[in-house]
Image (tube, helix red, strand yellow):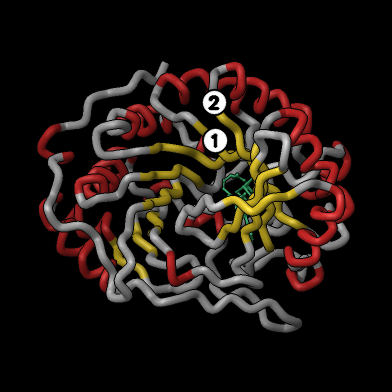
Amino acid sequence: MMARTSPPAVLSAPSTTGLIDAHGRTIRYLRISVTDRCDLRCRYCMAEAMTFLPRSALASLEEIALIAERFIARGVTKIRLSGGEPLVRRDVGELVARLGGHVGAGLDELTMTTNGTRLRAHAPALAAAGIQRLNVSLDSLKPDRFRFITRHGDLLQVLDGIDAAREAGLGVKINAVALKGLNEDELGDMLAWCVDEGHDLSLIETMPLGAIDEDRVDRFLPLTGVFETLAARFPLVRDSHRTGGPARYWRVEGSTTRLGLISPLTANFCDGCNRVRLTTEGKLYMCLGHDDQVDLKGVLRDRGVTALDDAIDLAIAAKPAAHDFRIGIGEGPAVTRHMSVTGG
Ligand code: SAM
Ligand code: SF4
């Protein structure tokens, strides 16, 4: 059982210097990919045959926690654990419990993005550790289609995982990648299901990250058109909620459901970006769409925890102004890293 643990005082002591990049953006959000491995193979995310990192390349959970705690001390108030599938990493519960100890004491929110396959086993412990909300990725409510998109996923297992999360008191937001010819005819029904179940829904444009077995341009569905279709069926009211990410929000009137549209290709919100990403190798990426990174695990191993602040400052100063995602015939991926490496 993952009970919350108290943070070591010296590592969570607040620092006076926050993290502000060269473009005046304050960094308050850290995403951590705790593993690049996954028990599914979603077609838009991964190739069927993937080469994963050798275990020797991974940062230990202790190293990830130490790095995350420096970010908390420097003003990061939100951490999202992602992957790959975060719940396939053995002992991930220890990291959740350790970071959960900072919720209310530096962190406003600790959260996770998961494919839901293992939630039945993990949800109670995640809630006990201080997580209040999860993002669960679900691209179809039709079992055969779900299996096709994920290459072998079992829809009922994920729906049962979502039930387990709700039973544990966790809020659930559904993430669905909008895919031309795959789920575009179903997005309205998915929103109706979310309204019935009391979930929020975020729709995501497929991003050109890492090689997959098909050309993403064939599946790219601009959310502008999707929104027009949804607005014809649902009473959508603009919502002012902002996360510093590329999402715009609407509320389905008469319900608790918020609809988010994450459109990094058709709408660029980089000027408000407040996030950086730590990979399972302990490398810090300042932008999902660029290759620049700083090896914080290397700094920690070679020079100790006290050297992390200088390395983090250098990294933040180098955060690019914007990504340059394009999707077109023959364009190929913008970066060779898959989303699973940097954490979606
Ligand atoms: N395995 C977990 C899951 O699927 O929720 C967490 C990691 S996954 C990389 C995080 C999110 O990224 C998921 O919602 C997934 O649909 C999304 N994603 C993966 N590859 C993507 C891509 N190329 N473009 C847009 N979204 C992507
Ligand atoms: Fe795995 Fe998530 Fe990528 Fe699907 S989207 S293959 S569940 S990491």
- Secondary element at image label 2: loop
Circles 2, 1 touching at the beta carbon (< 8 Å): yes
Q: Where is residue 178 in the image (x, y as percent from the top left)?
A: 75, 57
Task: Give whichever of 136, 337 is nearer the camera.
Answer: 136
Q: Residues within 10 Å of mark 2 (few under 14, many from 20)?
A: many
Q: In which quarter of the image is residue 62?
A: top left
Q: Residue at x 78, y 47 (%)?
A: 235
Q: In which quarter of the image is residue 95?
A: top left
- The Cα atoms of the two marked residues, 2 and 1, are separated by 7 Å
Tag of residue 134: 1
Report if the beta carbon of the residue with label 2 is closer than 8 angstroms to ligand 1. no
Q: Is residue 143 above or below residue 44?
A: above
Relative placement, left or right, of 21 versus 321 is left
Q: Where is residue 18 in the image (x, y as percent from the top left)?
A: 20, 57
Tag of residue 170: 2
Which one is earlier in the sequence, the residue at label 2 or at label 1? 1
Report if the beta carbon of the residue with label 1 is closer than 8 angstroms to ligand 1. no
Q: In this view, does 127 lie above or below 293?
A: above
Which image quarter holds the N terminus? top left
The type of residue carrying mark 1 is Leu
Q: Can residue 46 be seen in this view?
A: no
Tag of residue 36: none
Q: Residue at x 21, y 52 (%)?
A: 74
Relative placement, left or right, of 33 versus 174 is left
- Secondary element at image label 1: strand
Q: Which residue is drawn at 25% across and 45% down?
A: 72
User: Which residue is situated farthest in the bottom direction here?
Assistant: 330
Q: Position of residue 21 (x, y in %)?
A: 28, 69
Q: Can residue 153 be seen in this view?
A: yes
Q: Which residue is drawn at 24% across and 60% down?
A: 19
Q: Position of residue 312 (x, y in %)?
A: 23, 61
Q: How crowded is mark 1: few (under 14 residues within 10 Å), some or many (20 or more)?
A: many
